[in-house]
Image (cartoon, rainbow, N blue to C red):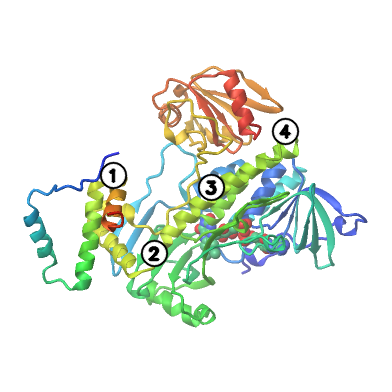
């Protein structure tokens, strides 16, 4: 049977651009049809911005790669019109076990938040995520949206100009030149765009290798995350077992630094390792095996004039914590509406600098979290191993030590404290919803709050008055009037009011809080809108 | 922010010290190191307050005497 990642999904098709006498100019070109590039294209096309995606390949990601997708990713996917198929296919999980040496030290249950539409996490092979995104692109095309993916189109050179970018593209039918007002480089960790522009990508290399094997087995392991520190079957190293759809299991074995990668990857060497872990009599098939070494690093600036970098091309983290693809989608969430406003002339070009500031902050947070996990999982000195083992030993007996165990802190959205788009907090409300925070979800009868806030500026009033519509220098803000009475579970009150009797929130199109006050005050909100669109 | 106590604060200093030594009796170096590590973590959790813990880390480093 052919795997989805063996089948071309967007085969090469000669573009009329290849026969144009003068290079055709597009609004936005994206390099890379990975999860980040596809999401960016959908986001822009949904807003009516013309986009072309170029990828040197014509298929989804080879092998599963990312498997763990966060609540925020699912919320973003809802906004992009493709959340449901991810939920339908993904494996939900909230339990896990931690093992040390030959024993289980504790188990946990990530109590899901009450009153939110999406689960904390789902597990899904990256190729399924990409497939869902490609199908969404095709659905948009069928509706006549200006979006196109060009398979086997490899970008070979980039020329940057004040008001456009020029690309040399190689195809099976020869090269061509094409132009764009804006270029978004989503071309992954080895970004050729970054190299072509001569931009550094410095950071910390972790001297370690991990064997990842996706195996297909009919096993009765539960859908839990199992993590081993120093198990008998992989002495001195770590191991992870996690379930994906279709009876595929992710196994991740730490191998150490001094190994022969090619040798370790051969089935005759992989299979005995897996048997030692799973048991001699468990039947399994290998779907995908890979060995990786990782780095934690980011670009200094995610913007260079008319070129914007997003996803792995801009930042790379260790896989512990599932922050790679999840954070790349947060980049897109941050960028899409800003670029649309700039293209429409409704916001100054400098609004895009806030993309750089906010997402650099996000990347730094992710790099810090994933570096800390790595330092716990692979102690770098005798003393750090001693402390690590002390934490694990204590965790078996005392609850207090469990929060210190760090086998990956799963991805959460960044709060943009200090962003120039925020206005000073003018509500004595919950810190969870201070300016710079992503809006928490809340139940609204049969529906949920977040979809009501998607893709436009919103004036959210909770037991407070305000006009139904406000237009400030071309930016339209529509009111969403709610009352704590709309939500008997009190989630809306607890998350947005706290002790206050009422509140007015200005919410950005990416569902982030820009400003909040206890009541509507026209001048203050006009100013907040200006700030939130980069005009102050 | 409260201050780390750096003046005598243990009721029975000699008794505590003897207990600390006794806890290490019969342990080899590796076991003793592990015990010390666990002890630090148990005490740190009892303190809880991060500002006190930060001050304790600085005090123990003996760098700004
Ligand atoms: C083992 C492993 C486990 C992981 N687990 C997780 C996880 O659980 N959760 C998570 O969020 N992340 C995880 N990640 C990270 C995740 O896979 C990446 O962060 C994600 O794929 C990045 O997406 P991207 O779109 O930025 O880049 P990519 O997926 O790398 O896509 C880049 C695209 O650009 C194209 N391209 C490159 N150069 C050119 C060119 N010159 N011209 C045209 N096209 C080009 C490529 O063909 C490719 O399609 C994991 C990664 C690994 C390796």
* Residue A458 visible from this viewpoint: yes
Left or right: B43 with respect to A326?
Answer: left
- Give the chain of mark 2: A
Task: Name the residue at 51% across, 33% down.
Answer: A435
Residue A213 point in image, percent of width and height: 49, 70
> Which quadrant: the C terminus of chain A?
top right
Q: Earlier in the sequence, mark 2 or mark 3?
A: 3
Residue A507 point in image, percent of width and height: 57, 32
The mark found on residue A346 in the picture is 4
The mark found on residue A361 in the picture is 3
Do the residues bearing badges 2 and 3 touch, measured as CB atoms within 8 Å?
Answer: no
Quarter of the view holding residue A485: top left
The mark found on residue B49 in the picture is 1
Q: Earlier in the sequence, mark 4 or mark 2?
A: 4
Whole-number angstrom distance, CA of label 4 to CA of label 3: 25 Å
- Foreground residue among A323 and A99: A323
- Dot 1 lies on which element? loop
Do the residues bearing badges 4 and 2 touch, measured as CB atoms within 8 Å?
Answer: no
> Residue furthest toward the right?
A21
Image height check: is A534 above or below B37?
above
Local packing at callout 4 (Cα closer than 10 Å; few below 14, some 14-19, many 20+) is some
Labels 1 and 3 share a subunit: no
* Residue A221 visible from this viewpoint: no
Q: Earlier in the sequence, mark 4 or mark 3?
A: 4
> Which quadrant: the N terminus of chain A?
bottom right
**Front tag of 1 and 4:** 1
Ligand 1 location (quadrant): bottom right
């Amino acid at each position: 049977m052919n795997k989805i990642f063996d089948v071309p999904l967007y085969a090469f098709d000669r573009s009329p651009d290849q026969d144009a006498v003068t290079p055709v100019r597009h609004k936005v070109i994206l390099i890379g049809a990975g999860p980040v590039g596809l999401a960016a294209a959908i986001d822009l096309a949904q807003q009516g911005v013309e986009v072309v995606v170029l990828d040197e390949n014509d298929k989804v990601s080879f092998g599963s790669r990312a498997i763990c997708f966060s609540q925020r990713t699912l919320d973003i996917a809802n906004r992009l019109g493709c959340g449901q198929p991810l939920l339908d296919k993904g494996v939900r999980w909230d339990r896990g076990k931690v093992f040390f040496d030959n024993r289980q030290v504790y188990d946990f249950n990530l109590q899901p938040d009450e009153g939110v539409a999406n689960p904390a996490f789902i597990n899904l092979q990256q190729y399924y995520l990409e497939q869902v995104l490609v199908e969404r692109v095709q659905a948009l095309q069928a509706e006549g949206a200006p979006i196109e993916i060009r398979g086997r189109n490899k970008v070979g050179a980039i020329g940057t100009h004040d008001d456009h970018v020029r690309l040399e593209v190689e195809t099976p039918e020869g090269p061509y030149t094409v132009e764009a007002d804006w270029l978004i480089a989503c071309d992954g960790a080895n970004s050729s765009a970054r190299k072509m522009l001569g931009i550094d990508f410095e950071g910390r290399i972790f001297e370690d290798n991990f064997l990842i094997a996706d195996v297909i087995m009919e096993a009765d392991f539960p859908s839990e995350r199992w993590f081993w520190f120093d198990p008998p079957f992989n002495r001195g190293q770590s191991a992870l077992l996690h379930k994906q759809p279709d009876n595929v299991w992710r196994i991740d074995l730490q191998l150490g630094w001094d190994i022969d990668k090619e040798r370790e990857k051969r089935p005759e060497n992989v299979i005995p390792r897996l048997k030692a872990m799973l048991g001699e009599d468990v039947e399994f098939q290998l779907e995908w095996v890979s060995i990786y070494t990782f780095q934690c690093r980011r670009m200094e600036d995610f913007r260079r004039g008319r070129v914007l970098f997003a996803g792995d091309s801009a930042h790379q983290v260790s896989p512990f914590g599932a922050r790679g693809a999840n954070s790349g989608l947060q980049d897109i969430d941050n960028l899409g509406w800003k670029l649309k406003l700039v293209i429409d002339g409704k916001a100054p070009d400098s609004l895009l600098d806030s993309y750089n500031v906010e997402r650099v902050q996000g990347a730094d947070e992710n790099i810090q979290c994933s570096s800390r996990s790595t330092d716990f999982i692979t102690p770098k000195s005798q003393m750090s191993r001693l402390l690590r083992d002390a934490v694990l030993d204590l965790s078996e007996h005392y609850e207090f030590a469990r929060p210190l165990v760090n086998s990956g802190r799963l991805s959460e959205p960044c709060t943009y404290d200090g962003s120039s788009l925020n206005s000073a907090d003018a509500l004595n409300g919950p810190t969870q919803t201070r300016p710079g925070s992503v809006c928490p979800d809340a139940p609204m009868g049969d529906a949920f709050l977040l979809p009501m806030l998607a893709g436009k500026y919103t004036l959210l009033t909770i037991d407070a008055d305000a006009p139904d519509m406000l237009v400030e220098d071309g930016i339209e803000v529509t009111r969403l009037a709610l009352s704590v009475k709309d939500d008997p579970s009190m989630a809306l009150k607890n998350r947005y009011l706290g002790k206050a009797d009422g509140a007015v929130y200005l919410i950005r199109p990416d569902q982030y809080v820009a400003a909040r006050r206890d009541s509507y005050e026209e001048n203050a909100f006009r100013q907040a809108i200006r700030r939130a669109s980069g005009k102050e | 922010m409260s201050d780390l106590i750096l003046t005598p604060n243990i009721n029975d200093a000699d008794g505590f010290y003897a207990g600390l030594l006794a806890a290490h009796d019969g342990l080899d170096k590796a076991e003793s190191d592990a015990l010390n590590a666990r002890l630090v973590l148990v005490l740190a959790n009892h303190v809880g307050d991060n500002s006190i813990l930060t001050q304790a880390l600085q005090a123990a480093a003996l760098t700004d005497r």
